[in-house]
Image (tube, grey):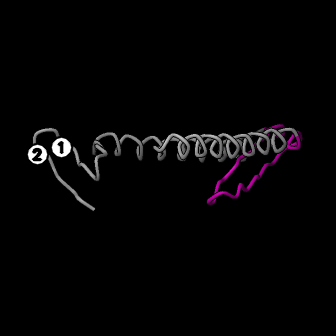
Amino acid sequence: MIRIADEKSHETTEEGTTVSNRLFLFLILGFTLVFIGIAVILIAAVLYGGGSANVGAVIFIGPFPIVIGAGPDVTWIVLFSIILAVLSIVVFLVINRRMRRSGG
């Protein structure tokens, strides 16, 4: 692995791929904000829901989705979450196959 640091642009090059440190920090910040937002919504729904709140979530651990939900209409939320999880896995596999065929 070859690592070259450019002091002017603050970018790191690894084997021909340029990765900006700021871009990586924004990516981590985005995931953190999404996680905090989901946690706040879940807590608000549980504490102040008024009895008719519906909550659903999909957590990916590797390729395995874990689907959870709570509320009176949770069946539809969980079903929709499972469909989205399967769809995202299929899209990942299709993109991965195309990348391998193109040599990328």
Report which quarter residue 9 is drawn in.
Answer: top left
Q: Residues within 10 Å of mark 2 (few under 14, many from 20)?
A: few
Q: Dividing the image into 4 quarters, which one contains the N terminus?
A: bottom left
- Taking the spot 46% from the left edge, 43% from the top edge, the residue there is 104
The span from disc 2 to disc 1 (Cα, nearest Å) is: 5 Å
Foreground residue among 1 and 100: 100
Q: Position of residue 47 (x, y in %)?
A: 70, 46
Residue 60 falls inside the magenta stretch: yes
Q: Is residue 87 left or right of residue 104?
A: right
Element marked by disc 2: loop
Kindly identify which numbered label has been placed on residue 7: 2
User: Range of the magenta residues?
Assistant: 50-75
Q: Residue 29, image x and y in percent?
A: 41, 43
Q: Is residue 57 left or right of residue 24?
A: right
Instruction: Report the side of 66 relative to 13 (left or right).
Output: right
Which residue bears the numbered disc 1? 10
Q: Which of these two is toward me, 52 or 26?
A: 26
Amino acid type, mark 2: Glu
Secondary element under disc 1, as helix, strand or loop, is loop
Instruction: Compare residues 51 and 104 and report the one nearer the observer.
Output: 104
Do residues under tags 2 and 1 come within 8 Å of each other at their CB atoms?
A: yes
